Amino acid sequence: MHTHQLVDPFGRRITYLRLSVTDRCDFRCTYCMSEDMQFAPRQQILSLEEAYAVADAFIALGVRRIRITGGEPLVRKNVLSLLQRLGARDELEDLAITTNGSQLGELAAPLRAAGVRRLNISLDSLQRERFAAFTRRDKLEQVLAGIEAARVAGFERIKLNSVVQSGRNDDEVLDLVEFAIARGLDISFIEEMPLGSVVSHSREQTFCSSDEVRRRIEQRHALVRSNKVTGGPSRYWQVVGTQTQVGFISPHSHNFCGDCNRVRVTAEGKLVLCLGHDDALDLKRLLRAHPGDGERLRQALVEALRLKPERHHFASDEQVQVVRFMSMTGG
């Protein structure tokens, strides 16, 4: 067993990996990608074998939580084979997926059987026309059916993720909370992150802070601070009298860098040490130059962690510093 642990220069142990398996998606959400996205050629994307090798190296170095992301991870061919291999790893305390929900009607039960414990499902609107405008796809009914299939499949927790934009969907905050409560789901509200340039809206005008969202919820529901820790950046509140926890992801207004325990690997095999920085280590080149050399891969990860920055510098009035879209980084 490899004895090195992944510790960054600020003493934070890395125990959580977000691993993207594709940059492709069947939606085109306006804050995530452009309508005519240029996707990476197939040979530039990690194979599922390579993705597993990366995960294996991280597990050997103490990672205990893995979240599979995209793009939309469930459009990746044969992704279940990777999930089954990871689901069989006893060292993992948590195997989760972030999805737009469109494929869950067919895949919810197989995902649960593979060992996936938790799902995050993106849902920014419950109104059909508005959902279609956000995602550039008229598939709200398909997503709602997918959420229902996931509930039936028996995951440990299902959480909705909603990016709140002032003047665009902030009037649905309470409706989304009620939707979650009625189904025993959790929900996180996310401040839009300044990643990639967007033309559909002005981020300064649409910015809606987590504090504002919380004030709206508290007009109807009592919230108490929760001690829930998932390894992600959400700060959770319990909706009194319900099973539902409400999370707030606040990259602008409440910087969550101090206890950051995670790194990302993109679909092209780039190790991204911080969402707010463009620095990355090319794991794919190493994997293809030295196939099967797990020791070399682990050593590269340990060394890369020495470069992890202390924090990002998102502020709602700053210019975009990171030019890649979220779909390229992995959700």
Image (cartoon, rainbow, N blue to C red):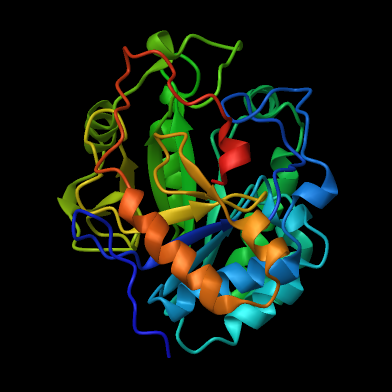
At horizontal 59% and vertical 81% (from top left) the residue drawn is: 87
Residue 114 visible within the image? no
Find residue 195 and report its horizontal and vertical position in percent. Answer: 49, 27
Q: Viewed as shown, does residue 56 lie left or right of 29?
A: left
Q: Name the quarter where the N terminus is drawn.
A: bottom left
At horizontal 25% and vertical 59% (from top left) the residue drawn is: 241
Q: Viewed as shown, does residue 88 lie left or right of 18?
A: right
At horizontal 27% and vertical 65% (from top left) the residue drawn is: 13
Find residue 53 and report its horizontal and vertical position in percent. Answer: 63, 73
Find residue 12 and report its horizontal and vertical position in percent. Answer: 23, 60
Q: In which quarter of the image is residue 283?
A: bottom right
Q: Foreground: 184 or 189?
A: 189
Residue 257 visible within the image? yes
At horizontal 19% and vertical 63% (from top left) the residue drawn is: 227
Q: Foreground: 324 or 230?
A: 324
Q: Foreground: 267 or 69?
A: 267
Give the vertical position of 139 relative to 283 (above or below).
above
Find residue 231 and report its horizontal and vertical position in percent. Answer: 33, 62
Give the vertical position of 50 relative to 292 (above or below).
above
Give the vertical position of 194 relative to 180 (above or below).
above
Q: Viewed as shown, does residue 262 lie left or right of 113?
A: left
- Count of picture labels: 0
Q: In which quarter of the image is residue 171?
A: top left
